[in-house]
Image (cartoon, rainbow, N blue to C red):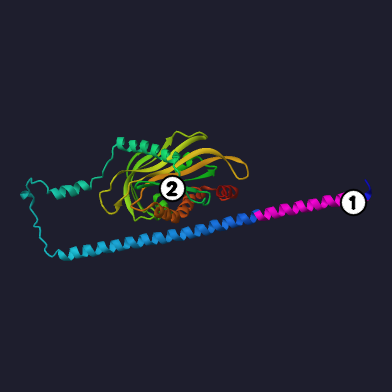
Amino acid sequence: MSAEAIKQHKAQRRREQVRAASRRCRDRQRKETEDLRTKVFQLEEFIAHTRQAHEWEMRQQHDRIQMLQRENELLTQQLAAATVVTDIEPVPLDKLDDTPLPDDLVHCISDDTPRQWSEELVYHAVEDTTGQLVTMLESEVEPVKSPVIFGWQFEFWCQGDKYYGRNRKFFPGVTALELGKRMQMVDPQRYMDTFPEVKKMEILQVFDENTLVMRLVKALPGKTFTQAVNARFLAAATPPTGSTSRWVYADRTIDEPTDGEYALENECNGYVFEDTTQELNDGTRVQGCLVQGVGEFESGGLGCSELLEELAKAFSSVVIRWESLFINDFIPDDADEFADMVLDL
């Protein structure tokens, strides 16, 4: 090969290398642009949903204030109407008889006695709820699916006057039991500060370290504040194929509060945590926990489209707050790569 041919060959190779490098640069720029567009879209969605959730919470507070004002007006009217007061003369001790207490006073005293629930009732609720949530999770019904938001996929369907929801996301570097314990041990006030739609968490009875009875007052999406007496528990369940362990953290309504302060809600919902291995975007296989929220709820007379609209308003805000409380707060300050890996799944 002549010197001129060698020179031309080298020039051709150089041109090909430049074109290949240029193509790789364009591909990288295109991918970076697409990633930025996706992140901008996600941030816009988050801001919109957060604003909607805030507006909804403000409406709930306004409705509550109006209700309290009406109650106050009614009590004021009743007080003004009570114009006749009967003086009660003190009775000397030696004049007291054995007359039984009036029925209304006996009823009042008995209402002050803390209620107790049987182990049979509560542990049956634990077993039954675990089975129901796993069945909902594995149901092959064709649900309505939301767009994937911050790695979360939400699915929704209706049956009669009930509606069902489930969502999921994988988190590397954490176990199912660890996440269950985080939810179990969280400070109630901190939880309510993070989720202002939960107004009251009152422990009524403790059975063991994983099972208790709680009065819960909260507002589900699209509803006013409601209350229920729930069995709240953390229980192990048989893991599915591909998982090494499964834990269920859930609420199940077992009774009705007696004060009548709020409307009643029948709850059967919670989280199913599974230890498993998944492949990340870069092809790396890592161990972690598949978090799956699942539940059955009362429709309250709303149609599927209305329910889905209300859930969509609150969904992204709820999952971001959940991650903040139970995932991000446990990530070391120097673990930036781990945090990015969680959010980019």
Dot 1 corresponds to which residue?
7
Q: In the picture, residue 219 is in which quadrant?
A: bottom left
* 104 or 100, nearer to the observer: 104
Disc nearer the start of the sequence (1/2): 1
Q: Residue at x 85, y 52 (%)?
A: 11
- Rendering coords of residue 134 (x, y %): 42, 38
Q: Is residue 152 left or right of residue 117?
A: right
**Pick the front one: 128 or 208:** 128
**Is residue 209 shown to the viewer in this render?**
no
Evaluate if marks 1 and 2 touch, with contact meaning CB atoms under 8 Å apart.
Answer: no
Q: In percent of the image, x 45 and y 33: which residue is there?
A: 238
Residue 201 percent location from the top left of the image: 35, 50
Q: Is residue 28 magenta?
A: yes
Magenta extent: 4-30
Q: Secondary structure at mark 1?
A: helix
Q: Measure the C-alpha gap from mark 1 to mark 2.
A: 67 Å
Task: List the residue tagged with mark 2.
Answer: 156
Q: Quadrant of the N terminus?
A: top right
Along the viewing direction, whichever of 215 and 155 lies nearer the viewer: 155
Horizontal arrangement in the rendering, residue 304 relative to residue 330 (left or right): left
